[in-house]
Image: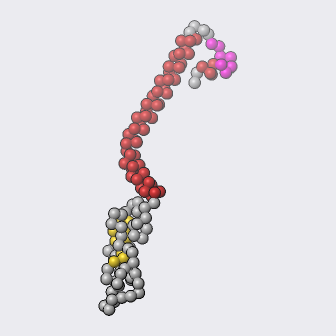
Amino acid sequence: MHCYTFMRHPNGTCISCQKWWTGPHCDAIVCNPEHGAPTKDLLMCECNEPATGAHCEVLTTADTLSHYNRRIAEAWVPVGALVIIPMIICFVLCERFADRRQIKRIERTLGDKMIVDDGSEIIHDFYP
């Protein structure tokens, strides 16, 4: 019983109830209707995210932001995969073609010059 005072009516019911309790004997819990509902036995509240607390009355900034960030992340994961995979393919192809263009540029620059591999590191600088 969650009566506000110890005083009772002659039939044993409470005169008034504590906050968040209702009923003739103040034994039914009251939940914040925006964020939860009482269980079948009316002794506890089942809170919807991001609300917490015994009566679903607590909304912290961290819990609220975490809840909505998680919802956005869950919605954007498939879209993210559809965007990232083509970007990776484009990057790999661009790198491959860039290497080929670099080799052709070096060959045009050197032209008819004869390169003798004498073990020096200069030749390795030209080719990746």
Residue span colored magenta: 115-122
In this image, 109 relative to 31: left or right? right
- Depth check: 42 or 109 in front? 42
Farthest residue to the top: give it: 112
Chief secondary structure of the magenta span? loop
- Depth check: 67 or 10 in front? 10
From this view, report whether residue 88 is shown above or below residue 102. below
In this image, 3 relative to 113: left or right? left
Residue 27 appearing in the image:
no
Q: Position of residue 113 (x, y in %)?
A: 60, 9
What residue appears at the point 38 percent right and 46 percent down from the top-left corner? 76
From this view, report whether residue 8 is shown above or below residue 70. below
Q: Position of residue 27 (x, y in %)?
A: 35, 80
Q: Is residue 100 in the magenta section?
A: no
In this image, 100 relative to 57: left or right? right
- How many numbered marks have been drawn onto this rendered protein structure? 0
Q: Is residue 116 in the magenta section?
A: yes
What residue appears at the point 34 percent right and 63 percent down from the top-left corner? 34
- Depth check: 95 or 76 in front? 76
